[in-house]
Amino acid sequence: MAQTLYKAFCEAKDLCMRELYDTNILRVSLPWTSAEYEDTRDLMTADYWPYGLTPNRMNLETLHDYLYEQGLIKQRLNLDELFARETREAFKI
């Protein structure tokens, strides 16, 4: 079930990104949306909102450290245990 949900979110994100760049129909009233999308893509790659543990590990570890240092969590956690196993393993290359 976790893998199905993960795949659904990935598909929804892909659809959103395709529609955002589709200039035949402007989805927002900003005339420079396409140029902004292209600049962002060139700077940060096409997947600038990556999903999953692996591409976000460094950010999640930094956040985890801040949470622990500031006393918002009482113990250090294993990030691998926070994600459903089937979502971690199914998308490894």
Image (cartoon, rainbow, N blue to C red):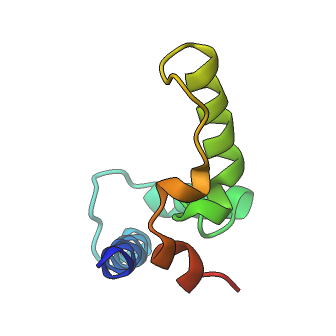
Count of numbered tags = 0
Where's residue 82, x and y in %?
Answer: 49, 53
Is residue 48 among what the camera can see?
A: no
Q: Looking at the image, which residue is at 59% across and 67% down? A: 47
Quadrant where the N terminus sits is: bottom left
Q: Height in image: 50 above or below 75?
A: below
Report whether 59 appears left or right of 84. Answer: right
- Farthest top residue? 70
Closer to the camera, 72 or 93?
72
Closer to the camera, 31 or 69?
69
Q: Looking at the image, which residue is at 70% across and 86% down? A: 93
Is residue 66 among what the camera can see?
A: yes
Report whether 48 appears left or right of 5. Answer: right
Report whether 3 appears left or right of 69. Answer: left
Q: Height in image: 30 above or below 17?
A: above
In the picture, residue 27 is in which quadrant?
A: bottom left
Q: Looking at the image, which residue is at 58% across and 40% down? A: 77
Q: Height in image: 83 above or below 71?
A: below
- Farthest front residue? 75
In the picture, residue 2 is in which quadrant?
A: bottom left
Where's residue 58, x and y in %?
Answer: 72, 47
Where's residue 66, x and y in %?
Answer: 62, 23
Where's residue 89, x and y in %?
Answer: 58, 80
Closer to the camera, 61 or 41?
61
Report whether 78 appears left or right of 18. Answer: right
In the picture, residue 67 is in which quadrant?
A: top right
